[in-house]
Amino acid sequence: MKVKYFASVRERVGKDEEMLDPPSDVRTVGELIGWLATRGEGYAHAFETRHVIRAAIDHAHVRPDATIKGAREIAFFPPMTGG
Amino acid sequence: MSPQPTIRIQIADFDVAQEIAALSAGRNDIGAVVTFSGLCRGGETTALTLEHYPEMAEAEIGRHARAALQRWPLTGLTVVHRVGRFLPGDNIVLVVTASAHRQAAFEAAEYLMDFLKAHAPFWKIEEIAGGRKAWVAATAQDDDAAARWDDQPPSQA
């Protein structure tokens, strides 16, 4: 799946997108965040306050318990500040 | 039948009068047009840069525009959100709602702005005097403002 990062999450991870194939026991958005946080210092920093990180699957907001099965694109970002 | 909303995400500036004219030209069923413009505020801030998630921003604004059209009897709806770097005084966002009567136009414009603030994937980075940059923090008020629309019955204007 394609994983995208925006704003402060993008800066901390150090890239804006990547193709990832998480292990099969990673089933939900929350579990994916937990797995991503183990991938290095930048990731750990990006996801350290994981309760504030927002996620979207295929361009729609999702909660941490959402399944990632079948997702083409998952995005992670801080709370939005548009308008 | 609901009108098609006009939704644009663009770098270029917008002209409020032109957008109103585009909504109302050749029609005689509009009794009220409400516009909201959001500008880059100065003070501590010397510039703002807006980053966005293009595909999701269009999807999310489109979803809320369609929800507004279902909830209020609107005859026209335009949302323009700019991205890029802004100086104090620059336009950032525009919502235009048109309806037969003012209440629907006022409420729909406020609803759309509340949802844009809390749910549309845009992020502001702020430059302050001395060149330091910091991401603007989201406020709980913005979430509360969007949430208050959840349990309200639609008003019939």
Image: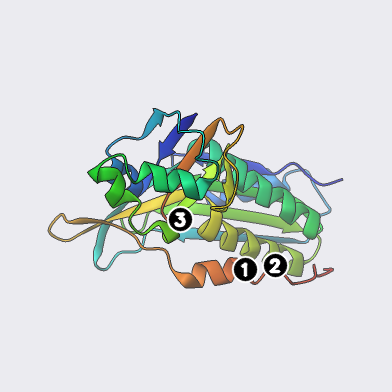
The quarter of the picture where residue A21 lies is top left
Residue A41 picture location, percent across and down: 23, 45
* Above or below for A80 versus A23: below
* Above or below for A79 versus B106: above
Q: Residue B147, labelled with which disc? A: 1
The chain under label 2 reads B
Which residue is situated farthest in the front direction here? A25
Residue A19 picture location, percent across and down: 42, 26
Q: Which of these two is toward me, A51 or A75?
A: A51
Q: Are marks 1 and 2 in contact (CB under 8 Å)?
A: yes
As shown in the figure, which amino acid type bears the numbered disc 1?
Ala
As shown in the figure, which amino acid type bears the numbered disc 2?
Asp
Residue B123 picture location, percent across and down: 40, 51
Name the residue tied to disc 2: B150
Q: CA distance from mark 1 to mark 3?
A: 15 Å
Residue A20 picture location, percent across and down: 42, 29
Crowding around mark 1 (Cα neighbors within 10 Å: few <14, some 14 to 19, many 20+) is some
Residue depicted at x 66% and y 52% = B64
Q: Can the viewer see residue B42 in this picture? A: yes
The chain under label 3 reads A
Crowding around mark 2 (Cα neighbors within 10 Å: few <14, some 14 to 19, many 20+) is few
Name the residue tied to disc 3: A80
The chain under label 1 reads B
Q: Which of these two is toward me, A11 or B56?
A: A11
Crowding around mark 3 (Cα neighbors within 10 Å: few <14, some 14 to 19, many 20+) is many
As shown in the figure, which amino acid type bears the numbered disc 3?
Met
Which residue is situated farthest in the right direction here? B1
Residue depicted at x 41% and y 48% = A34
Q: Are marks 3 and 2 in contact (CB under 8 Å)?
A: no
